[in-house]
Image (tube, coloured by chain):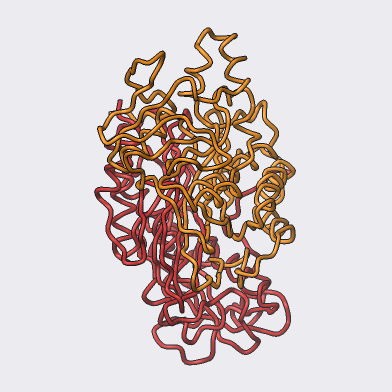
Chain colours: A orange, B red
């Protein structure tokens, strides 16, 4: 048996350097010199076996990449630059060291794409299945962070790509829109990444901003995966595009004429979210992903 | 059924304010204005059902407090001031909303003791048991961070309290030594919190510092819990004090004469860790807690 400290040594010896980090892995906490003019952004996202991936089907590199990319996607949504990450792993007792290394290889590959090193972590083994959480630190680096709360009536609503059917594989292999998010932050009034599904994530923006929205069904970009899934399950491709989660495209509001994105509707003063189909509106209820907590 | 978003609303409405935080819970990332002269410290520690607590025996408030306090203890070990935390929770599907609220109440109680608000999180439900990770942000606030790497030959070795037998309950109810850690940081050359056990944690300091150590068995402060446990299991109270984990006292090195701590030995130039008993040394092998990762 090898111990967690062997794993920590291996991770440390395989870690990219960052000019921000003065003390990295191997102490009780990492130490960073934060740039004086940069806001600090922070958040955590986890992946859980049987919920966000299936360890019996998905290789560990994909799982590691997914949890890092989910966090990088949050950076994209805020318009910030990923800076560093820490990771907690609850690893099944019978997982070989090689498996743990492959998880970290996936984490690292995803982080390296945006110069985002892993600077700390906590690895434990247990009787249960794999749970991994990544906490990401981002910095504003000259770009004003965009929240969910700035949409105003009259704004247009945009997405950055086609939606739906991510369960066919894109939920694991997506590229976080970090570079695009930073560009859009100059114009966007509100932004979020599409993890829970368009209908639900638009609700988050509307609620945080105190506005409503009308989506034009004919403008919603439908991914070929949504079409394929529709042929399998009989649910329309539009419904998949509206409600499936884990697209990891960006949903944003802003003035008319933002380049490089797809307009799908507009922000209204009146609360409520509606879908215009053939000229008549129907309420667009949030049907995307939400974890249920018992009462 | 209530959803995770109801839980998030509840957490947000129950959260303490921090002057550092300009955007808190409810967006893709929280936003902080980091004080220009402060170093940023960051790390993550998790608790897992059946490893760090037993959900069938321990109330959720204690579990929440423990995971926050483990992180506050890391701040203590570095001499930094806790600033804010984010939390990831993998919650059993059948856990009632009330249980989740009680977990957060414990987190909050522990964080509030050091003005450390929860500013973000990720809650998901699954078929498995409870896993919770907290990532803590700390700031130097005028105190130089202390790593494991600064011990030098001739330094004395100290601990901040009696050791051993924490499994009888202290592993859940300890008070993190944040205030003491900041005081000691002025004099300490290296510091760590005793989570893995004295023999193993001293090894971390020695390895990071490139030194050895001699511990005087007669100087090791033995907790009454170690004595009680010894009477139950026949292992000596000293062995419990040397090897049990989760004391969450501080272990530090520094010059002679540091006040308010207990001297237990000294740092040597020669590598290796030895225990002096009745005037003769024996190797002190690390026997504290280490998660095993299969090969």
Image spot of residue B216 (x, y percent): 56, 80
Q: Residue at x 36, y 47 (%)?
A: A150
Closest to the observer: A257 or B189?
A257
Quarter occupied by residue B255: bottom right
Image spot of residue A256 (x, y percent): 45, 40
Closest to the observer: A2 or A30?
A30
Location of the C terminus of chain A (image quadrant): top left
Residue B21, compared with residue A228, is above or below; it is below
Image spot of residue A252 (x, y percent): 46, 40
Q: Residue at x 60, y 38 (%)?
A: A92
Closest to the observer: B92 or B289?
B92
Residue B220, compared with residue B256, is above or below; it is above
Closest to the observer: B208 or A111?
A111
Residue B92, compared with residue B195, is above or below; it is above
Q: Is residue B108 left or right of residue A215?
A: left
Q: Is residue B46 left or right of residue A118?
A: left
Image spot of residue B8 (x, y percent): 33, 42
**One can see residue B49 in this view:** no
Q: Is residue B48 left or right of residue A152?
A: right
Q: How many marks?
A: 0
**One can see residue B50 in this view:** yes
């Amino acid at each position: 048996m090898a111990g967690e400290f062997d794993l920590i040594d291996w991770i440390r010896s395989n870690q990219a350097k960052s000019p921000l980090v003065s003390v990295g892995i191997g102490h009780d906490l990492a130490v960073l010199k934060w740039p004086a003019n940069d806001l600090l952004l922070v958040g955590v996202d986890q992946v859980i076996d049987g919920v966000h991936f299936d360890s019996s089907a998905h290789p560990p590199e994909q799982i590691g990449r997914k949890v890092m990319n989910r966090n990088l996607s949050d950076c994209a949504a805020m318009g910030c630059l990923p800076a560093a990450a820490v990771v907690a792993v609850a690893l099944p007792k019978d997982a070989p060291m090689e498996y743990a290394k492959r998880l970290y290889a996936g984490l690292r590959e995803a982080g390296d794409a945006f110069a985002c090193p892993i600077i700390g972590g906590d690895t434990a083994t247990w009787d249960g299945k794999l749970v991994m959480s990544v906490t990401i630190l981002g910095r504003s680096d000259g770009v004003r962070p965009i929240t969910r709360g700035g949409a105003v009536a009259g704004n247009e609503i945009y997405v950055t790509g086609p939606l739906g059917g991510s369960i066919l594989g894109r939920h694991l292999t997506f590229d976080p829109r970090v570079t695009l998010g930073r560009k859009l932050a100059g114009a966007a009034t509100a932004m979020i990444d599409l993890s829970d599904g368009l209908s639900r994530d638009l609700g988050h923006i509307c609620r945080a901003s105190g506005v409503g929205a009308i989506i034009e069904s004919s403008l919603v970009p439908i991914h070929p995966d949504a079409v394929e899934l529709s042929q399998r399950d009989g649910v329309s491709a539009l419904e998949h595009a509206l409600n499936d989660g884990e697209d990891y495209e960006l949903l944003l509001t802003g003035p008319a004429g933002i380049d490089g994105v797809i307009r799908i509707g507009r922000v209204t003063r009146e609360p409520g979210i509606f879908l215009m189909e053939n000229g008549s509106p129907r309420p667009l209820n949030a049907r995307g992903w939400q974890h249920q907590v018992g009462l």
